[in-house]
Image: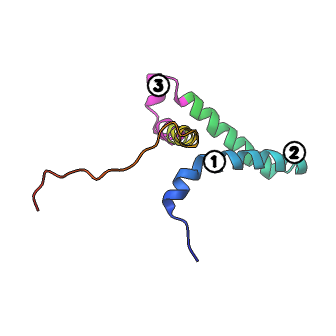
Amino acid sequence: VILPSHKLFQVLTPFFLILIFLCSAVIYSFTNDSLILMFLMLQAIFYFLAIVSFIPLKAIEKFPLFVLIKYFMATNYILILGFFDFIRKKRIVTWKKIESSRNF
């Protein structure tokens, strides 16, 4: 059994977040379950806080929760942009080994 790397899951996180939100909405539309509604509302609140965290106000930057949410969502947004750049072959990145100035 080959298990995928945690690095693969890090790259796929933004797509999982979108999928979880959409699945929660679809499940709630069919079941009207209050537990699903609670999870859907928590997700909506989290995304709302993410939008608010990008407003450049000093009062918002003082709360560590906003900083954490902003960092998490900005990272996922950049992953999505990078994925679409890769799909369109707009930017191909190859890693090159740097020459070290240290003598071993």
Q: Which residues are magenta?
A: 53-73
Mark 2 neighbour class, 10 Å CA radius: few under 14, some 14 to 19, many 20 or more = few
Q: Is residue 17 above or below residue 51?
A: below
Residue 13 or residue 46, whichever sits in front: 13
Residue at 52%, 23% (x, y): give it. Answer: 55
Of mark 1 and mark 3, the one earlier in the sequence is 1
Q: Is residue 7 above or below residue 24?
A: below
The nearer-to-camera label among 1 and 2 is 1
Residue that mark 1 sits on: 15
- Viewport quadrant of the C terminus: bottom left
Of mark 2 and mark 3, the one earlier in the sequence is 2
Is-magenta flag for residue 19?
no
Q: CA distance from mark 2 to mark 3?
A: 37 Å
Q: CA distance from mark 1 to mark 3?
A: 31 Å
The nearer-to-camera label among 1 and 3 is 1
Q: Is residue 1 above or below residue 32?
A: below
Residue that mark 3 sits on: 59
Residue 80: % across, % down: 57, 41
The nearer-to-camera label among 2 and 3 is 2
Q: CA distance from mark 1 to mark 2?
A: 21 Å
Residue that mark 2 sits on: 29
Residue at 63%, 47% (x, y): give it. Answer: 15
Q: Farthest residue toward the bottom?
A: 1
